[in-house]
Amino acid sequence: MSRSKPFSLEEVLRDPRAFFAVAKSEGDQQVPDAEGVFTLSYRKTEAKPDSREFLAKGGSRN
């Protein structure tokens, strides 16, 4: 799901799963309200190292 405009608070409350899915696939999402902005970020847990990062660092040096 691709979004070019920010979610409204009403959209987030109506379909929170879509909001989370977009944050996961496209990056940080912002929701403005009358007093400021809420931001949702997604960060993978570091349980599995990324193979590209591993190779970029020169692989195993043990």
Image (cartoon, rainbow, N blue to C red):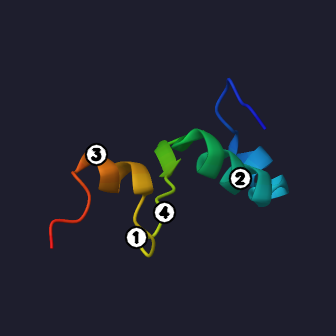
> Mark 1 near mark 4, Cβ–Cβ under 8 Å?
yes
Of callouts 3 and 2, which one flags the residue occurring earlier in the amino acid sequence?
2
Disc 2: CA contacts within 10 A as few (<14), some (14-19) or many (>=20): some
The residue nearer to you, when weighing 21 against 44, is: 44
* Disc 3 residue type (three-letter): Ala
Q: Which mark is residue 46?
A: 1
Q: Which mark is residue 56?
A: 3
Disc 3 is placed on an element classified as helix
Quadrant housing the C terminus? bottom left
Tell me the CA gap for discs 3 and 2: 29 Å
Residue 33 in sight:
no
Q: Nearer the viewer, mark 1 or mark 3?
A: 3
Q: Which mark is residue 44?
A: 4
Q: Nearer the viewer, mark 1 or mark 2?
A: 1
Disc 1 is placed on an element classified as loop
* Disc 4 residue type (three-letter): Lys
Quadrant housing the N terminus? top right
| Residue at image mark 2 | 21
* Residue plotted at (61% across, 51% down): 24
Q: Nearer the viewer, mark 4 or mark 3?
A: 3
